[in-house]
Image (cartoon, rainbow, N blue to C red):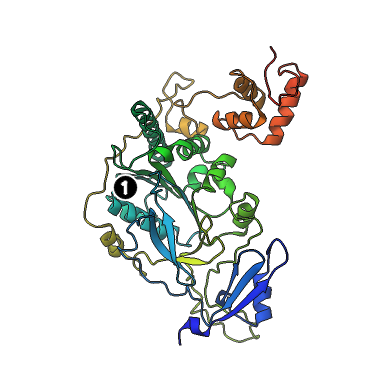
Amino acid sequence: MTPRALMREYILKTRPGGVKNYDHDALCDLLEVDDPSRVIFEQGRGREAVVRVFPTNPLARMRAITLEDLEIDENGCMRIGSYYDGEPLRMRVFDPDTGNAQRIIIFGTTGAGKSRALQAFLIACKRAGIVVHLADLKEGQSVPEANGNVATRVTTQKEAMGLLRALVAEAQRRMTAYAKLGRSGFIINDPDPLMYGVIDEANRLLEKGAPYRAEATKLIKELGRTGRSVGVGIVLAAQAGHLDELGGSDTLRAMLKEGEVILLRWSSQMMASLVGDGLLPKGETLQPIPKILGRARRVQRWGTPVDRSKEKPNSQGMCYHLTSARPTSMARVFLVGSLAPHTGYDPVIRKLYGPALPPGEPLTLIFPPPKEGTDGKAAGDGDDLEHGESESLPAMPRSLKERIVAALESGPLSEADLLAALDEDGGKDAKRGSVRTTVSTLRGEGKIAPKDGSGLISLPM
């Protein structure tokens, strides 16, 4: 008999509003199951939830990815894995109706399988003729087989900034060119190819204290806003610690809700962030992904030898596709590459890439002119690292008061339009409450016109 033939299934009726949270360990105790990974909980529609108890975890063994999986289908998707019930796990690479590029992020703790999932995306892009410019910020070690298989590959934070500036410049070039043609959308390979900027270990670039954090966040936000409609997409692979590692940007996180979000094994802080920031649908919860599958909970008797032979991490690639139609269904990425480590490049992964040259030409990285030091000498890299900003970006108003006044100089704005203008001016994210308080203060100072029945905020006449 197959494991599914021995499966037990329970349909639960939940209280109005669905399951706000549940205790997976308590559920396993109730069902008298000592291996939590055998119990799969899934939130259903309306007021139903499904609990399935398998003899072994149905995702414990996952087949190797194939070239057929990596082919992009008529919906612009590639197969990267399987849900626990056998349904294919698909990730969208582009929108076939509009040709738009996607915004993709892959979260996962160390050893959760981020790099293998990213390899699958890179291989699919190469074989589909999609141009990829990659920053592997683990000194090139995360996805080493991508060397020679992407148009551009850099390995340092400084080079990653040059890459991001070049991608934004390319997106702006396309916008200008398409406007002259009277074209409002993107058509793949007419005349430009679909293109992706990929930042692996993106948390190194965007976490608190990172040298280029502020500018990197602005550039990624710009690609997310405008790049997708001209065929320049952005992919981030990051540690699943906390969403503040993504530049501390509400706008950046909001963009991700509309893209492809894959969550591999995570930390408790990440789960709190997902719920708080709305990346996890309201009222839904995720079953934890254990580090070791098949480990039963039991009391160890005093003096009895402990058998650790099977306690090796084996849940790499298990994940949730948070922005799919099944955000709470556990899935797993297909096996990408060899199980055993190699002294050099993984031959299985290199074979999947194939011997052909990668599509596209290398980007010319863009670096700002060197800053003038206080002693009259040009400041070196250390100066850039200290400030984390580039002279290639325009100076922004320093305070929220100045930014609000600057936004209103072009004419009266509704509160929603004012928030949008502040979101676009390149400054720090401004929350609605802070904007309202500041507007009230400016009115008291006579720098903003008194409130009237129009609902518009304006400068004094």
What residue did someone put label 1 on? 130
> Residue at (60%, 87%) from the top-left corner?
304
Q: Residue at x 46, y 64 (%)?
A: 317
Which quarter of the figure is the N terminus placed in?
bottom left
Q: Is residue 132 visible?
A: yes
The percent position of residue 137, horizontal first and vertical second, equals: 42, 47
Q: Can you tell which quarter of the image residue 362 is in?
A: top left
Residue furthest top in the image: 461
Q: Position of residue 365 (x, y in %)?
A: 35, 35
Toward the viewer: 170 or 193? 193
Task: Between residue 196 and residue 206, name the one nearer to us.
Answer: 196
Give the answer, above or below, for where 366 lies relative to 332.
above
Quadrant position of residue 286: bottom right
Q: Residue 17: horizontal and vertical position, in percent?
A: 70, 61
- Residue shown at 78% from the left, 20% from the top: 444
Say which of 440 and 188 sits in front: 188
Task: Judge from the rendering whether residue 411 lies leftward or rightward of residue 105; answer left or right.
Answer: right
Question: Is 111 on the left or on the right of 297, as rendered?
Answer: left
Q: Secondary structure at mark 1?
A: loop
Query: Which residue is depicted at the point 61% across and 35% down?
Result: 429
Name the one closer to the observer, 259 or 338. 259
Amino acid found under the numbered disc labelled 1: Ile
Question: Can the viewer see residue 158 in this picture?
Answer: no
Is 372 rendered above or below residue 220? Answer: above
